[in-house]
Amino acid sequence: MTFYIIGSGNMAWFLVTRLTGAGHVCKGVYSRNHDTGSQLADAFGLKQLSSPEEIQDDADCCIMAIADGAIDEVVKRLSLSNTVLLHTAGAASINLLSSATQHYGVLWLIYSIVKNNLPEHRQIPCAYEYSDTRAKEVIQQLANSITDITYEADGTSRKWLHLCAVLSNNFTNHMMAITDELCRREGIPFDMLRPILSQTFERTTTTPPRALQTGPARRNDEKTMTSHMKMLDDHPEWQRIYQAVNESIKAMYKSGNQ
Amino acid sequence: MTFYIIGSGNMAWFLVTRLTGAGHVCKGVYSRNHDTGSQLADAFGLKQLSSPEEIQDDADCCIMAIADGAIDEVVKRLSLSNTVLLHTAGAASINLLSSATQHYGVLWLIYSIVKNNLPEHRQIPCAYEYSDTRAKEVIQQLANSITDITYEADGTSRKWLHLCAVLSNNFTNHMMAITDELCRREGIPFDMLRPILSQTFERTTTTPPRALQTGPARRNDEKTMTSHMKMLDDHPEWQRIYQAVNESIKAMYKSGNQ
């Protein structure tokens, strides 16, 4: 297939790498950031376009790998007819694309991509959505070039999946960031926590996390919770997390709700 | 070495398994719960004691693997002189033990132990603390029989380590429990999130989690955060978590605090 790419960030690099590697042909790259756009074009020997208007209706698809908030503005500057227009955002509606073409869709990779350390495996979950069969065919072909894990999700499912990714991934990372900061401050090796952390992750593959919950809130150990709250006195924002999560754990396991 | 064990829960089973397996001799088991106490005694051919008072001052150590809140009460009923008295709780002070003997300490395994699925490896971090050299020798010998990862931590360090374990492990598990519940309700496979979750964990082994933070709060995407809050309308306790964690992420990365 032939494609245009809009964007020159981590996701754009990854998509160009994978798709050209799979034999698809990139007809041009447009990026609001001219410098990173040049880098991407140079790295893969691509034509760099200076505006979205230069994107012709002569490719199988045009993929927007840009910030959610920028999609709207770029779509306004596109006019396509045969080309399938795609965005790659987890939280943005497919409908943002409908004004530019009849054939459009979403290809969202649920994975963290970093330009300098691109994943080489094919275990990258892809949730996709499409406007019509033409878009469906193009998206499925692209997705299969990239990964072995694909999942058709309508807009509502994708929104929930995105919220779930934030809670389970971004929030989890923040818990570790707080912990890491506390460990550094107190001169404690964070490595002491790694075995139990990997254990927690491995166990959820066989047992629902709900059944694995432990900790002071789970056993209503008010004394420990009060002491922990006090220890966090100089970080009220962490105290609010501590309190909110404890309340939520207590609510999840209160009698009659096991 | 010879030892008594007080308790018959997950940790007691594990300690008896590992310590007798390493050649140490258990002189008796006391448990407030007579039934599980019998099960433990029967499984290992041990003498079951009917009260803490039956514990003689004739062993190298006496290990309490019981709930934090029960330590105080049991200690009152012990009178030891040569025996080293230990508790295994992350959040309980070593001083709880001082009234029963001169030689005492804490051996805290930072790992989740489940009786029916005991770990067989030796990568179980052990934080320990002791009152004197006699206690130190006994604890180190016990710890080395169990694990390859030991860490001497005074009471203050152990308290912080315990808070860190709650934040990074118990809270992380709760994030996954919420996510799992949302996925079930919406008919979405939780498996779609596993690759990014394991990615997050693996990445923290080489990069501080602070540097890996992504998500709407990190990029100040108010639109997505508002939409997520609305989606959680029927779970105000999850909304409070969502808000508290987002505020904390914003505080951690606000300009001048990168």
Image (tube, coloured by chain):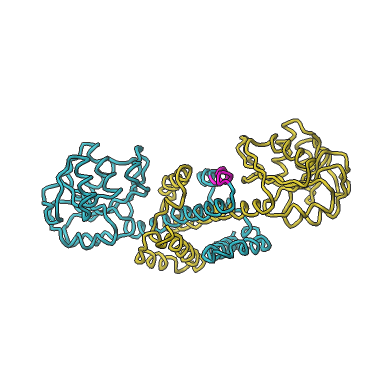
Chain colours: A cyan, B yellow
Residue B125, percent across and down? 62, 42
Residue B150, percent across and down? 65, 40
Residue A169, percent across and down? 44, 52
Residue A210 visible in the picture = no
Q: Which corner quadrant of the image does residue B3 belong to?
A: top right
Residue A211 vs residue B143: left or right?
left
Q: Nearer the viewer, residue A17 or A232?
A: A232
Magenta stretch: dominant secondary structure: helix
Please check the rendered image and state whether residue A154 is part of the magenta-colored stretch, yes or no: no
Q: Please give the name of the residue rendered at 51% of the width and 65% of the height, measured from the top-left corner.
A: A237
Q: What is the tally of numbered marks visible in this picture?
A: 0
Magenta-drawn segment:
A189-197
User: Where is the N terminus of chain A found, in terms of image quarters?
Assistant: top left
Residue A85 vs residue A88: left or right?
left
User: Where is the C terminus of chain A found, in terms of image quarters?
Assistant: bottom right
Q: Nearer the viewer, residue A145 or B157?
A: B157
Q: Please give the name of the residue rendered at 69% of the width and 45% of the height, measured from the top-left corner.
A: B128
Residue A141 vs residue B10: left or right?
left
Above or below residue B250? Residue B1 is above
Q: Please give the name of the residue rendered at 30% of the width and 48% of the height, measured from the top-left corner.
A: A10
Q: Nearer the viewer, residue B228 or A6?
A: A6
